């Protein structure tokens, strides 16, 4: 009689990266989605793809990747909640997919820890369900660097170069300038490191950048006369690219405000920002240990890419916002996870390792709880700003501004979006039209000029009727009732029936808006 064979099954591993992604989605759905309206920049991006609202100014530095991402949702519904839910789920799936690329390089445990370190930041949670490009650049960069390292090995096949090219294209499509700063260290690695001197990775980076930049370059020639002209205008819109140390501003604004421009905010709760000061020190330690362990590429390349991606936001502009450095945080989470694992392995006795795990877990929990507290504060601020925009739009509708209509002023894009009106401005780096053109248009459709109550009316609206908008700090100066030209069939000099629509389309095409990256 033959004894039956005993089949020994391996214990199933806990899918930690998937659990981190699920927790990230749950945090967004619980803490952000129910409480957040549309922000200033979001309305600019969304208006480009919203079939029900006029397009707001789209400035020279902007890229259309986030507009394309939101377009399928906007084609079906104009519900902000639905858009938030879809983006929250997509960002959680993208987080899992981006860090999943690193599993063969770091292992499942370190990969999950890296994803947790990045997903646990309040900026990552806040901008997950928002139509903003910075988070998507961050996740694209993480995946791109991972695919690059995997593509450098001869048996990698076609999958790694294709993934590398696709991720570089995605990062460039979401933000053209960030695509440049991401591609530079990857191409430098191909040229400097002998083990990386293979044509496939270099061609994938160049091809991916070309694909991602194609729309941006084509629009540069269509609207501004070339790439050089668009880059020059981008620099002007940003306040002049030059040598500016913005590290102090980035640190002071780390816990808010969401945009520090001008950046005169004091440093509040510095104890919650110590992790930011520790990042360069920990990254340097990770580099030294990786060099000694001969695992330098897995650690040094993400740090190099993080360094180049931080250059424009720390050295070239004179303002800051917490979301600017999301790609840097995403890339640095990988070597930090490797450093944490190395530190744990350095503790030889298992009992001592178990004892050290307790304080480490407590420190991580304390960090995450502090991030939740900062998230609540900044979510409330963002919600208050969106509520003011909606209140102003509602009051404008009561004053008779119904589509087609025009709203001008610095706050015109978000308020005009909520009201269904076009937006315009005659001054500042948000300038897109002239006072003469605006006044001429105001004779054809309802128009209102928005200004802070204490500053008085714009020069072109001094004769317009003032109406305070309670709860917003703004006053709307409403133009006289426009004379709508009735449709005329035939006859010389008659205005076409669609003249208003044509005028609106022409203005939308030639706008040059304020850039807040």
Image: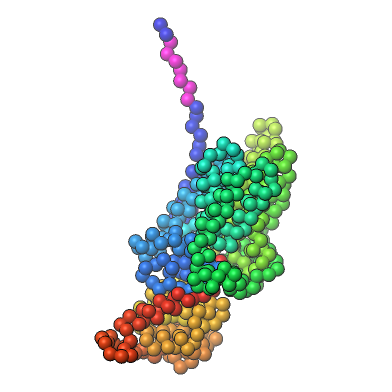
Between 423 and 270, the one nearer to me in the picture: 423
Q: Can residue 6 be found in the magenta stretch?
A: yes
Task: State which region is magenta.
Answer: 3-9
Residue at 58% in and 62% down: 177
- Residue at the extreme bottom: 463
Viewport quadrant of the N terminus = top left
List x then y, in percent, for residue 42: 48, 67
Q: Is residue 347 above or below residue 148?
A: above
Between 142 and 264, the one nearer to me in the picture: 142
Residue at 38% in and 74% down: 420
Q: Residue 82: in sight, yes or no?
A: no
Q: Is residue 394 above or below residue 192?
A: below
User: Would residue 362 be found to the left or right of residue 450 on screen?
Assistant: right
List x then y, in percent, for residue 363: 63, 48
Image quadrant assignment for residue 263: bottom right
Viewport quadrant of the C terminus = bottom right
């Amino acid at each position: 009689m033959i004894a039956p064979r005993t089949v020994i099954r391996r214990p199933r591993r806990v899918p930690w990266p998937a659990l981190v992604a699920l927790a990230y989605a749950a945090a967004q759905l619980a803490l952000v989605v129910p409480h957040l309206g549309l922000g200033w920049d979001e309305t600019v991006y969304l208006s480009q793809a919203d079939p029900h609202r006029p397009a707001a100014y789209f400035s020279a530095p902007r890229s259309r990747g986030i507009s394309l991402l939101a377009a399928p949702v906007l084609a079906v519904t104009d519900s902000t909640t639905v858009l938030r839910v879809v983006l929250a789920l997509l960002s959680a799936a993208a987080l899992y997919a981006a860090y999943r690329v690193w599993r063969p390089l770091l292992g499942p445990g370190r990969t999950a820890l890296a994803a947790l370190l990045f997903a646990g930041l309040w900026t990552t949670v806040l901008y997950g369900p928002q139509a903003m490009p910075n988070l998507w650049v961050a996740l694209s960069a993480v995946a791109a660097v991972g695919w690059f390292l995997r593509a450098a090995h001869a048996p990698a096949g076609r999958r790694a170069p294709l993934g590398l090219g696709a991720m570089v294209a995605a990062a460039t499509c979401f933000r053209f300038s960030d695509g440049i700063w991401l591609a530079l260290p990857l191409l430098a690695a191909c040229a400097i490191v002998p083990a990386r001197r293979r044509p496939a990775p270099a061609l994938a980076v160049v091809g991916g950048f070309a694909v991602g930049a194609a729309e941006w370059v084509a629009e540069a020639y269509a609207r501004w006369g070339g790439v050089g002209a668009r880059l020059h205008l981008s620099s002007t819109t940003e306040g002049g690219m030059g040598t500016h140390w913005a590290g102090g501003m980035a640190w002071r604004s780390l816990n808010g405000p969401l945009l520090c421009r001008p950046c005169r905010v004091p440093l509040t709760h510095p104890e919650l920002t110590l992790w930011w000061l520790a990042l360069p020190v920990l990254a340097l330690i990770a580099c030294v240990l990786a060099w000694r362990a001969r695992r330098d590429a897995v650690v040094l390349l993400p740090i190099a890419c993080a360094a180049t991606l931080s250059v424009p936001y720390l050295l070239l502009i004179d303002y800051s916002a917490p979301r600017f450095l999301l790609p840097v945080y995403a890339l640095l989470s990988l070597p930090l996870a490797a450093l944490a694992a190395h530190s744990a392995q350095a503790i030889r006795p298992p009992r001592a390792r178990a004892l050290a795990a307790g304080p480490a877990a407590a420190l991580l929990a304390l960090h995450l709880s502090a991030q939740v507290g900062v998230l609540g504060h900044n979510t409330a601020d963002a919600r208050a700003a969106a509520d003011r925009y909606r209140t102003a739009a509602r009051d404008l509708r009561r004053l008779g501004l119904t589509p087609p209509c025009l709203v001008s002023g610095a706050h015109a894009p978000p308020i005009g979006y909520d009201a269904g009106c076009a937006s315009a401005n005659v001054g500042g780096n948000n300038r897109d039209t002239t006072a003469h053109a605006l006044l001429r248009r105001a004779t054809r459709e309802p128009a209102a000029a928005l200004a802070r109550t204490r500053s008085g009316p714009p020069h072109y609206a001094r004769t317009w009727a003032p109406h305070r908008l309670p709860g917003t700090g703004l006053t709307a100066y409403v133009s006289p009732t426009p004379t709508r030209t009735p449709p005329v069939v035939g006859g010389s000099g008659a205005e076409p029936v669609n003249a208003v629509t044509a005028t609106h389309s022409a203005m939308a095409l030639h706008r040059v808006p304020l850039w807040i990256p």
